[in-house]
Amino acid sequence: MIIIPAIDLFDNCAVRLFKGNYKEKKIYSSEPWKLAEGFAKNGATLLHLVDLNGARNQLGINEDSILKIRKTTSLKVQLGGGIRDKENWLITIKLELIVLFSERPP
């Protein structure tokens, strides 16, 4: 069994939305890379990130946190949220896995 920890990012913070409502969210950390470091120290090798800003067509807002997670951990990163085509800026971060999806045609 592989357990994959996940961090949802909104405005460079680790959050959890209440029933998908962006107005009702709990902030777990303003330093999500520290959460990622904790997962790595506890044996995780893969991290699933969700760019909630990106999912709302606000790409790039969480770039600093994503890059810091890449620089401070050895985790392989899977990223989803707002990635709708291969030209997206996120490709330049050299992630191992990308979730590509759109509810509407790109």
Image (tube, rainbow, N blue to C red):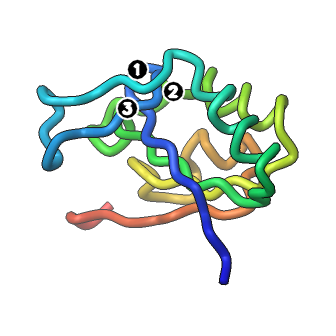
**Residue 70 sits in quarter:** top right
Q: Residues under labels 3 and 2: Cα distance? A: 12 Å
**Which residue is pictured at 71% across the width and 60% down the height?**
46
Q: Which residue is mark 3?
A: 15
What amino acid type should be assigned to the residue bearing mark 1? Asp
Question: Which image quadrant is residue 54 in?
Answer: top left
**Spatial CA span between label 2 and label 1:** 6 Å
Could you say which is closer to the camera, residue 34 or residue 55?
34
- Between 19 and 60, the residue placed more toward the observer is 19
The N terminus: image quadrant:
bottom right
SS under mark 1: loop
Question: Few, some or many C-alpha atoms within 10 Å of disc 2 (few <14, some 14-19, many ≥20)?
Answer: some
Q: Which residue is mark 1?
A: 11
Separation of disc 1 and disc 3 at Cα? Answer: 9 Å
Residue type at mark 2 is Asn
Which of marks 2 and 3 precedes in the sequence? 3
Q: Is residue 33 visible?
A: yes
What amino acid is labelled 3 in the image? Answer: Val
Q: Residue at point 83% right, 30% down?
A: 72
Q: Position of residue 8 (x, y in %)?
A: 43, 41
x, y percentage for residue 32? Answer: 58, 27
Query: Are the residues tagged 2 and 1 within 8 Å (C-beta)?
Result: yes
Q: Which circle marks residue 62 in the picture?
A: 2
